[in-house]
Image: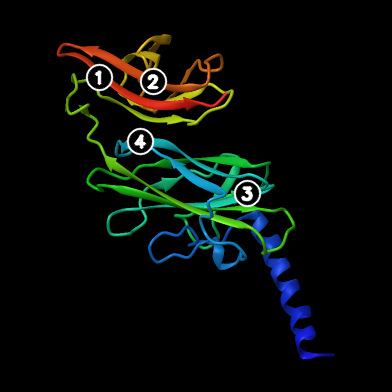
């Protein structure tokens, strides 16, 4: 038997075994964070972050120490049929911070680390998939946290060849819980609009995550780019858990919009806004 032929008989089956193993989760330290590799260490054949696809981490611009937020990791590439991912959270010294909750479906701790979350199992999907990963923020004084993630938009042939790897990072600053829009909020009514997703959205409702103290009442409204209000709702919220609020966006025409979340206090209204796009 020729040496090259023997080499292929040995190496190709090993790569196939590795590809099948990662269907149930990526190895730890594969997010592209400082001092970490990415999924491209095993999945070869295409450049990392090719223009044909993308990876996005949806995370709050600010986090409240000790609170739990839902991180959304969204990968997309036309033609991909299977998706996998891994995410971690690091402080300014590149040390892992916070605690991931992997009790929900589709996610697990990566083998060899309690600070990396990966898929369980890889997801069959056409063109796009997203995972929701709850993360409990660390104690006060941690400072800025950066989330790092890598994802594999695979072609579904169960080999390590021809897949596309994407990476992303997203920073989140520590918030005191008593500061809104550059000024102190009314005591007992501190709150923050943590995240808005999906963005862009197709035919789903817009989901807002708000961190608030008990007893806070919100006015939620959606405006078009001309400032005209197209949807509104008053919401009683504030158990400190960071509950989700659904805004009615299914019937909106395609275009750019502004979602406005506000509350009132003795010193006047406090408002936070986010922009989003409705595709169709």
Element type where label 1 sits in the image: loop
Q: Residues within 10 Å of mark 3 (few under 14, many from 20)?
A: many
Residue carrying label 1? 189
Looking at marks 2 and 3 on the same chain, the residue that comes earlier in the sequence is marked by 3
What residue appears at the point 28 percent right and 44 percent down from the top-left corner?
139
Looking at marks 1 and 2 on the same chain, the residue that comes earlier in the sequence is marked by 1
Q: What whole-number distance in Å separates the C-alpha atoms at marks 4 and 1?
A: 16 Å
Looking at marks 3 and 1 on the same chain, the residue that comes earlier in the sequence is marked by 3
Picture quadrant where residue 178 is located: top left
Q: Are marks 3 and 4 in contact (CB under 8 Å)?
A: no
Q: Are marks 4 and 2 in contact (CB under 8 Å)?
A: no
State whether residue 79 is above or below residue 47. above
What residue appears at the point 71 percent right and 60 percent down from the top-left corner?
20
Residue carrying label 2? 259
Residue carrying label 4? 67
Q: What whole-number distance in Å separates the C-alpha atoms at marks 1 and 2?
A: 20 Å
Measured from the top left, where is residue 40 in percent x and y? 55, 64
Q: What whole-number distance in Å separates the C-alpha atoms at marks 4 and 2?
A: 23 Å
State whether residue 39 is above or below residue 273. below
Q: What whole-number distance in Å separates the C-alpha atoms at marks 3 and 1?
A: 41 Å
Residue carrying label 3? 83
Q: Nearer the viewer, mark 1 or mark 2?
A: 2
Element type where label 4 sits in the image: loop
Observer able to see residue 117: no
Apparent side of residue 272 relative to residue 37 in the rendered image (left or right)? left
């Amino acid at each position: 038997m020729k040496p090259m032929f023997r080499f292929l008989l040995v190496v190709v089956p090993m790569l196939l075994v590795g590809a099948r193993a990662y269907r149930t989760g990526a190895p730890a330290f594969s997010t592209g964070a400082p001092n970490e590799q990415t999924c491209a260490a095993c999945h070869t054949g295409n450049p990392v972050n090719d223009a044909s696809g993308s990876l996005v981490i949806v995370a709050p611009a600010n986090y409240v120490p000790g609170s739990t937020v839902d991180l959304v990791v969204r990968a997309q590439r036309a033609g991909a049929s299977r998706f996998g991912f891994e995410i971690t959270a690091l402080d300014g010294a590149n040390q892992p911070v916070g605690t991931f909750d992997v009790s929900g479906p589709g996610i697990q701790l990566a083998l060899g680390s309690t600070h990396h979350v990966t898929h369980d199992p890889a997801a069959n999907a056409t063109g796009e998939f997203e995972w929701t990963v709850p993360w409990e923020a660390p104690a006060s004084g941690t400072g800025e946290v950066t989330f790092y993630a890598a994802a594999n938009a695979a072609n579904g042939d169960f080999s390590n060849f021809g897949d596309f790897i994407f990476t992303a990072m997203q920073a989140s600053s520590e918030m005191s819980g008593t500061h809104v829009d550059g000024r102190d909020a009314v005591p007992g009514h501190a709150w923050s609009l943590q995240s808005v997703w999906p963005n862009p959205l197709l035919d789903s409702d817009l989901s807002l995550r708000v961190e608030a103290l008990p007893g806070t009442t919100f006015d939620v409204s959606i405006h078009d780019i001309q400032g005209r209000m197209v949807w509104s709702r008053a919401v009683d919220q504030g158990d400190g858990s960071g509950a989700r609020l659904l805004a009615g966006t299914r019937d909106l025409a395609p275009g750019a919009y502004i979602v406005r979340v506000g509350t009132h206090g003795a010193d006047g209204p406090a408002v936070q806004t986010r922009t989003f796009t409705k595709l169709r």
